[in-house]
Structure formats: C-alpha cells, structure tokens
C-alpha cells in the first residue's frame, strides 16, 4: 500500500466517522450534513452519506436517558473536590468533537464525569476515573454495556494495567498550578504515544497572574517533549454549583445563577511518558454521607483526620464566604455541599453519627444508638450535646426532605397497591425509558402529561355532536372526557382497579378526535381510503398517534428528548380500544388492530385490560346521556321519543310530568336515576363475569367484554341509539347541515394543504419534520411512497386558472405532504379550522 493510498483511506475513515457522529445527533439529511463536514467536497460527502444509509449501518442515536438517569441524578457537588459540571450544551459539543476524531479510539475521562456520560450515551465505550465514590457508583449503574468508572485519587499513580492504554484523555483539573500538573501527569500516564489530552484551562482574566501560570504550564510541557496542538478560547461553559451560589451570597455579591464561568481548551499531543514535576500529597480518606433519595440535593463530607480543638465542633466562617479557596487557608475536616465548613476533634464519633443520619435515623434514635455503642468513653449528656450542636450548625435533620409526613414514590405506590385488587393493571416500561420523579407513580405521570398536553386542551373547542355555535352550553369533548373519568372511576373503585390508569385513560380516550367530531373523522377516513390507505383514519388510532408521536413538548426537553408524551402502553391501550364494537367491519377493535401502526408497542391485540374496559363502558353512558340532554335542549327530542324506549320505563326512572315541568328540567332531574340504573347494572354484571376468571391476564382473551352491561340493558341502550340518536339526532337538519359543511371543509382543506403545505403553521411543520425518518412515516411509506390526487377531487380549486400551477403537481406527491396535512387538520379546533378555511378557500 502506498503512503498516498494510506492517507486517502485514513481521510475517508475520518469523513465516515464524522457523518456517523452527525447521524447520531439526529442530523439525518444530506443538506444538513454537508455544511458540517469540515470542508469536505459535496461529492465525497454525498457518496459516503449514501453508502451509510444504503448499507443501513447500525447507528445508535444519543440516548436521552443519560440526562435523567445520570446528569440529573449527580450527587450534590463537593466544594473540596472542585466539582463544577459542564453545561449540557458544552457536554454535547465536546463529546461530538471527541467522537469526530476518536470514534475508533480508546477514550478516558479523568475527573470529567458529565463528559464521560455524554460519550457513553453515544454508545461509545469510555473509562471514567474519578475521586468521588458516589459518582463512580452512579456511572456504573447507568452505563453497564462496556463503559466503566473506577475510583481514583490523582495523588496516586495510575495502575500499570491502565497505563499507556488510551488515545484520548479528557481532563478538567482544579484551577491551581499544582493540580494542573498533577492531572496532566496522570493523563500522560494513561496516554499512548501520540495520544491527545483535552484539558480545560482558566481564561486569561480568571485571576491576577493566570497568564503567567498558563505560560509556565505550556513551557513545562514543551520541556518534557510534548507538543501543544492548539489552545481554543471559550470552549466549555460551567453550571454554577450550589456551593458557589452560597459563597457569592455570603460575600455580598448579588449574581444570577446563569453560567458565568467558561474555560479555554488546551489540546496536548503526548510524545513520550515523561510527566511534569508536581508536589504530591498523601491521599486523604474522605467519606460522604446523604439521606436516601436526597443524594443529589445535599451531602455532607468528613475527612478522617482529627483536628485538635477545644470545641466538639467549630464552624469556620471564612470557608463559606469566598468563591476561591485561596482566600481561606484555615483547614476543615467536616463540610457540606452548601459550603459550610467545620473542625471536629473526634472524626470516628462523627462518622458514626453521620452514618446513622444517612440511614434515616432521627436525632433521638441517633443519640440512643451512639450511647449504647459508646462504651462509656463519653457521657450520655456529652453525646446529646454533640449531636444537638451538629444539628444546630448544619441542620442536616431539618434539611432532609424525607420525614414521616412525606411519602416517597415507593410508599405512594405501596399505598396505591394496597387499595387496589388483584385485578388492577400494573404499568409496563415506557417506550423511551424514564425514571420516577420521586413524588408520583407511573400512571399519575401519564395523567398529568395528558392534562398539560396541547391535544387535551384543544378538546375544549371540539364538537361532541351539535355544532357549537348553536348553544354555548352544549357538550364539547373536554367536558365529555371529564364525565367519562368520573363514571369510569366509580366502576373501577368497585373492583379495586388502578384509579390513576382510569383517570389517564379517560382523559386521553378522545384526544385523537378531529374538529367537528365524527363528521371530520369520517371525511379524512374516506379520503385516505380513496387514496389507497387500507386502514383509513379513525380517532382511536390517531389518538395513539398524538400521544406517541405528534405531541412535541418533549422534543427538545433537557430531561427527556423524544417524540410524543412517552405514556405507558396501558394508557395507549385505553385510547386504541375504546371502540363500541369488538368485531366486524368499520371502526371495530379487531379491524383497527388489523391495520394499526402501534401493534409492536402495545403487543396485545385482544380485549383491553379492565381499566380500559371501564373507560369504554363509561364512554358509552356519557355520550348517550349528553347527546340526549343536548338534543332536548335544542328541541330535537320530545317526551314521546323517550317514552318510546324501554330504558326510560325502568325503575327508578320516572318521566311523569307535573304541571310546570319542561322536558329539559325533567331530564336533569332524572339523569341521576338513569346513571344509577346503568351503573348498578354494569357493576352487577361485571362482577359475575370477572368472578369466573382465574386471573387478570384472562381478561385479554375472554369471549366478551368483562366490564359492560347485561344483555337486557345493552339491548335497551341499542334501542335508544337506533330510535333517538340515529333516527332523531343524526337526522336533525342542524346536525345534517353541520356534518355536510364539516365534511366539505375538512376534506377540501386536507387536499389543499397537501398541494400547498406552505400554508401549514410554521411551528407545526418544524415539530412534525422530526417524524419524517421515524417508524411513523415508515408505516405510510410502506403502503405508498407517493400519491396522485384524482382531478375530480380538486374541482373546488381553480387550479387551471392559477398562475404558475402545473397540473403534474397533483401527481407523484410525496406521501409525507398528505400525512403532514392530515395531522395538521386533525389537530385544529372547530373555530380554528373555520378561520383557516375561510382565509384560504373563502
């Protein structure tokens, strides 16, 4: 192989690594990739990019879990370890830079745990060396597929096993000359010849004399034969640690918590194994303590070396008053993460006290245990004084968020489980992974995410049956969803089902409804079927689309980065399976399951769990009652219509009219009786069915719904549906004209926006674009990559008279434009669709 060929291959590999790194970051189109390829020629980028896509190279995108499982769980920073964390932006920028160059290299991080975690999140193996045992333990619990962390104090030499092993070492030393030389020397010990060390160094105005210190450091490295590759200014930013916030307050400086400290980047090319001269210290034994679930909020530290003092514990005020440790030379051997420093004379005693505190013991329990273990070295009164003084100065018991009055998420779950029966559902893993926030259990988080979602909020202006302008007091989808939640919760309570799952499923069950209710849904369904999509469109499927893909509030969240709301499968099951019929054509559960894109996520195609069935049953009662109530209010239903149905003759329902009664007031009076009759029937009949099952898992493969009415009441409700809702309400001229108008507006706007997507809201387009390369669009592209809109569908548009319009524009349209238009139209409220329609189509 010639030198020239070797150089070309090396260059090609670097370009490939660069593009892989960009793809990992979600930059996945050639147009976006090209300008980020460090000046590579378009033809070379195009060739490499297409090869990677064509060969379906396994590219693991960055996992957002490193934020929730690692970064936001980092233990409270230790002031004496100089623990300043890089900002999230700096972490990702630096990790990408390292991976661009060292994709195939061995990487180590010395004292830079956040950077190590980001690199590991890109599925790249990295070794972390850190002095903090709590950080090492956290890292190893989160990243256990090749990456690893080990405890290392830089005052100790690197082990022979790790020496000369790494091609890339990232370090962030404390900003003092002796520490710099020590960290760099340990990095040199880790480095192969030719390796690069990436070192954060203070900027030129950090303090007086810093420029001279930088020059001396560079000179020392060059004297050892190492090469300075470059120094780049203002590369890394730091989050201000809590202990420095406190120091600034104590020194009288009124500063915001925004990142104000940055570092320059020094890159060192290691040429040999020669290290710098530095003053080494004997490693100290430093122990950390924290309460359960409070590790990331507060820690207390103890150096196991006594300080002779006349006081049992003495506070050092100077320790907490300066951001620079150079301003305080007084030694401390007990300190806290909020920068309170103390001197204690008996570290063994304080170690025992702090261990008991960290185990959750209260003050009295701690005093009692220490007294029993003390062997009469100190009197009970002395022990009490020491523990009381420790609490007075540190407030460690008072600061603890865990107490008898607060329940942890584990305790909340235990209490919830204790109220639930063996029939209650349990939460499955979320699609994108997620840890408990510590104060809610899984279905509670689902419910809350739904309540705060855009889709749920828009239900306040989506038609239930009648057009809303007829009367402001008529039902809309939001009120209906709350009614369903109330009814389903009552059913669930009778059987000990999970109330949080029922609440979440009820509130979300109609989140996929289009504007103008079933009229808008039917219009989109017919259009999709006529364009060749077998599954058509329905609000059950689209509801899961909304919560899995379309909601965008977590798209750029620093806590979780993913499409949709990341709900549990159980809640999505409630949405997909609240259909009226289980079998048959049309929108039956079996038919929807046959074509659904959510099969792999939900897995079970049988009946829904019992909570989902409770939601379905409550839905039927709610819309039966609300449709009739609204119909009476608008004069579409008369008393004889009700009395022509068996249901309204059953006890305790009484529709005998007194003088002065009107039908609407009478219906409101009797509504409670109707609900009582229907709910008693459901609970009684469901009890019989459930009692025949061996376990809750039999529910999914049962012959029929386990939670629903008796055959007699089901027939009565069917009669009401046929005689009143179908024969009267659906044929009411106002409903017919509203449905006709809605169908025309929805279908025409869908087609118009497919042809002219530039009229779609810009923010909606930006959020939707992220779905172009996901399984969501794959579902549609597997059916049709392009569509052609027949001319007869477009007669409402004067296309032949429009300047510049070419008739071929209606052919071979990327299916993405149709799906984008469908999702946008379906997301609109009634009022918003009306406004857009008249703006665009008149």
Image (cartoon, rainbow, N blue to C red):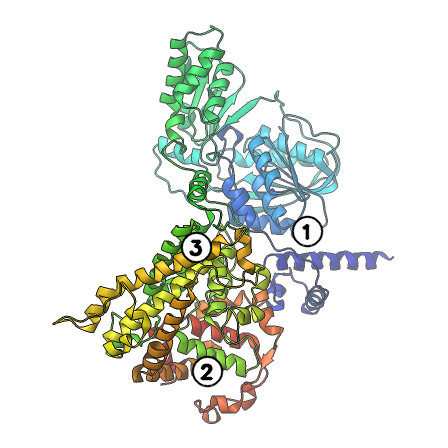
Residue 239 position (above or below residue 798)? above
Residue labelled with disc 2: 752
Q: Position of residue 104 (x, y in %)?
A: 72, 50
Residue labelled with disc 3: 687
Considering every residue shown, the one lying at the far top of the view is 376
Distance Cα–Cα, label 2 vs label 3: 52 Å
Q: Nearer the viewer, residue 790 or 626?
A: 626
Residue labelled with disc 1: 101
Res. 682 image quadrant: bottom left
Q: Nearer the viewer, residue 511 or 197?
A: 511
Q: Nearer the viewer, residue 385 or 618?
A: 618
Mark 1 or 2: the one toward you: 2
Quadrant into which the C terminus falls: bottom left
**Residue at the spot x=30%, y=85% of the render?**
733
Residue 366 position (above or below residue 240)? above
Mark on residue 616? none
Distance Cα–Cα, label 1 vs label 2: 48 Å
Relative horizontal placement of residue 135, taking residue 483 as reference (left or right): right
Mark 1 or 3: the one toward you: 3
Relative horizontal placement of residue 267, taking residue 435 as reference (left or right): right
Q: Nearer the viewer, residue 288 or 199?
A: 288
């Amino acid at each position: 192989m010639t030198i020239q060929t070797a150089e070309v291959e090396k260059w090609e590999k670097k370009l490939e690594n660069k593009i892989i790194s960009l793809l990992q970051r979600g930059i996945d189109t050639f147009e976006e990739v090209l300008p980020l390829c460090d000046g590579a020629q378009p033809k070379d980028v195009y060739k490499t990019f297409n090869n990677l896509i064509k060969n379906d190279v396994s590219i693991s995108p960055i996992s957002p879990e490193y934020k929730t499982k690692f970064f936001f769980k980092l233990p409270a920073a230790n002031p004496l370890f100089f623990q300043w964390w890089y900002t999230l932006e700096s972490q990702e920028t630096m990790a990408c830079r390292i991976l661009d160059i060292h994709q195939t290299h061995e990487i180590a991080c010395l004292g830079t745990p956040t950077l190590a975690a980001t690199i590991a999140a890109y599925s790249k193996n990295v070794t972390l060396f850190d002095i903090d045992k709590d950080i090492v333990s956290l890292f190893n619990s989160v990243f256990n597929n090749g990456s690893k962390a080990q405890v290392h104090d830089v005052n100790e030499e690197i082990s022979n096993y790790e020496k000369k092993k790494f091609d890339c070492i990232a370090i962030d030393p404390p900003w003092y000359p002796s520490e710099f030389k020590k960290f760099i020397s340990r990095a040199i010990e880790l480095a192969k010849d030719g390796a690069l060390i990436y070192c954060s160094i203070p900027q030129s105005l950090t303090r007086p004399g810093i420029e001279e210190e930088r020059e001396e450091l560079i000179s020392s490295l060059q004297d050892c034969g190492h090469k300075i590759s470059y120094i780049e200014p203002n590369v890394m930013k730091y989050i201000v640690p809590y202990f420095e916030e406190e120091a600034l307050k104590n020194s009288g400086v009124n500063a915001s918590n925004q990142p104000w400290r940055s570092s320059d980047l020094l890159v060192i090319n290691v040429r040999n194994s020669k290290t710098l001269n530095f003053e080494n210290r004997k490693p100290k034994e430093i122990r950390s303590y924290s309460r359960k679930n409070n590790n990331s909020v507060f820690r207390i530290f103890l150096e196991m070396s006594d300080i002779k003092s006349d006081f049992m514990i003495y506070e050092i005020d100077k320790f907490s008053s300066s951001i620079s440790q150079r301003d305080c030379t007084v030694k401390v051997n007990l300190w806290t993460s909020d920068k309170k420093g103390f001197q204690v004379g008996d570290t063994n005693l304080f170690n025992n006290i702090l261990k008991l505190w960290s185990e959750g013991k209260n003050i009295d329990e701690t005093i009692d245990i220490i007294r029993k273990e003390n062997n009469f070295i100190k009197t009970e009164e002395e022990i009490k004084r020491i523990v009381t003084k420790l609490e007075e100065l540190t407030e460690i018991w008072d600061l603890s968020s865990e107490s008898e009055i607060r329940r942890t998420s584990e305790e909340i779950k235990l209490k919830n489980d204790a109220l639930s029966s063996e029939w209650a559902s349990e939460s499955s893993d979320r699609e994108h992974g997620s840890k408990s926030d510590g104060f809610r259990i899984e279905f509670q988080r689902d419910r809350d995410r739904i309540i705060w979602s855009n889709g749920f909020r828009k239900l306040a202006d989506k038609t239930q049956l009648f057009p809303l302008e007829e009367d402001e007091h008529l039902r809309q989808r939001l009120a209906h969803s709350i009614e369903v939640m109330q009814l389903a919760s009552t059913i669930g309570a009778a059987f000990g089902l999970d109330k949080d799952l029922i609440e979440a499923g009820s509130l979300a069950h109609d989140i996929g409804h289009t504007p103008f209710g079933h009229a808008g849904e039917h219009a989109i369904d017919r259009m999709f079927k006529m364009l060749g999509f077998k599954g058509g469109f329905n609000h059950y499927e689209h509801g899961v689309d909304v919560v899995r893909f379309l909601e965008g509030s977590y798209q750029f969240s620093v806590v979780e980065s993913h499409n949709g709301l990341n709900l549990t499968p159980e809640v999505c099951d409630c949405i997909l399976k609240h259909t009226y019929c289980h079998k048959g054509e049309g929108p039956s559960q079996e038919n929807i399951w046959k074509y659904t894109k959510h099969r792999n996520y939900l897995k079970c195609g049988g009946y829904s769990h019992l909570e989902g069935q409770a939601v379905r049953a409550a839905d039927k009662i709610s819309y039966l009652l609300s449709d009739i109530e609204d119909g009476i209010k608008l004069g579409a239903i008369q008393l004889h219509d009700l009395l022509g149905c068996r249901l309204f003759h059953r006890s305790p329902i009484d529709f005998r009219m007194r003088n002065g009664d009107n039908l609407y007031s009478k219906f409101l009076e009797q509504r409670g009786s109707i609900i009582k009759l229907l709910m008693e029937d459901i609970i009684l009949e469901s009890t019989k069915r459930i009692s025949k099952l061996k376990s809750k898992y039999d529910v999914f493969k049962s012959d029929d719904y386990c939670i629903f009415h008796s055959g007699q009441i089901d027939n009565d409700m069917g009669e009401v549906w046929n005689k009143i809702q179908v024969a009267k309400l659906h044929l009411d001229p106002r409903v017919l004209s509203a449905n006709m108008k809605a169908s025309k507006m929805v279908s025409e706007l869908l087609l118009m926006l497919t042809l002219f997507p530039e009229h779609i809201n810009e923010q909606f387009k930006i959020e939707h674009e992220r779905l172009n390369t996901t399984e969501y669009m794959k579902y549609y592209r597997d059916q049709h990559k392009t569509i052609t809109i027949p001319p007869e569908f477009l007669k409402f548009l004067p296309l032949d008279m429009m300047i510049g319009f070419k008739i071929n524009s209606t052919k071979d349209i990327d299916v993405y434009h149709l799906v984008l238009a469908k999702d946008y139209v379906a997301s609109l409220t009634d009022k918003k669709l009306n406004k857009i329609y008249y703006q665009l189509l008149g």
